[in-house]
Amino acid sequence: MAEQTPTAAEFAAQAFEEDASTPLATQARDHVTMLERLSTVGDFERPSSPRVFVVANQKGGVGKTTTSVNIAAAMAMRGLRVLLIDLDPQGNASTATNIEHGSGTPGTYEVLLDGAAIADVAQNAPEIENLAVVPATIDLAGAEIELVSLVSREQRLRKAIDAYLAASSDPVDYVFIDCPPSLGLLTVNAMAAAREVLIPIQCEYYALEGLSQLLRNIELVQQHLNPRLEVSTVLLTMHDARTNLSASVAAEVRHHFGDRVLRTAIPRSVKISEAPGYQQTILTYDPTSTGALSYLEAAREITTHRREESRA
């Protein structure tokens, strides 16, 4: 009797078993594990009071906007009510959530400079239920200069968020503020408004160089503007399990920040980079990809990772 040819699935399983120690096999195993775990998890647990995060890192290209958008989307898709505030004049968070943000569109500029209410400028994300977005337009580029002469210039965003949360008939669970890659007045406003800092750190050597300056600025905000601000969450991004560099950077970050570093690291992924080009998050663009599952798992971790306290 002729020997039966193995199917493609059997061949793949055999190859995986024979070479299960390689980085590629490890990634495949982690992907399957996350898929199985998340398939059994329903809606995320709601916090006892709203949690307000500023997503900050003055170094560009570390995944601030990608993290803000995808963590917010993951939580909204798992039953939580989320507000995403785009504070970057480039408006990339608005683009990724398919939110109108052409020049003249009411958004964060009007909130900061004109005292507009967040409820009047927020838009519902068309593809993600429970996610509202305050868009950023190019008008915001001049806000740093215009804010200088205003009274309580560092507290304007905080007052707007406090008013929004107090007046909301359907309680908001999480607020995420996506900052520009700088430590100017816009970022200071965000830090003064938030209770928690989420720092995305790219798994490359240069990503560590500016970290000390960011932490010093956070300490200054704690001392002078917002004593209840804390660095509660650190997320490793653009992680490549095949390289010693990623492992080295990850180990150094975990040594410094301890349990504030999420167990989940976001892999370097072409799909994650492609999604904004289609005005989508990775969660809607390719929901079963490793990138989507990683952000979903990171979001789940955040909902249980740190203590939940009332805002000041």
Image: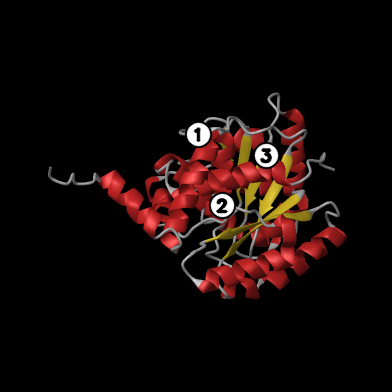
Give the image location of residue 19, x and y in percent.
39, 60
Residue that carries the numbered disc 1 in the rendered image: 128
Q: Can residue 162 be seen in this view?
A: yes
User: Who's the residue at 46% across and 45% down the image?
Assistant: 32
Q: Is residue 184 left or right of residue 223?
A: left
Q: Nearer the viewer, residue 82 or 247?
A: 247
Q: How far apart are marks 1 and 2 (CA)?
A: 16 Å
Total marks in image:
3
The image's mark for residue 274 is none
Q: Identify the residue shown where x is 59% and y is 48%.
A: 298
Q: Which amino acid does label 1 sit on?
A: Ile
Q: Is mark 1 on a helix, strand or loop?
A: loop
Q: From what the image shows, is residue 16 above or below residue 256?
A: above
> Three-letter amino acid code at disc 3?
Tyr
Which of the marked residues, 1 or 2, is nearer the chain's N terminus?
Answer: 2
Query: Which residue does the numbered mark 2 point to in the structure image?
Result: 67
CA gap, disc 3 and disc 1: 15 Å
Q: Which residue is drawn at 42% across and 60% down?
A: 24
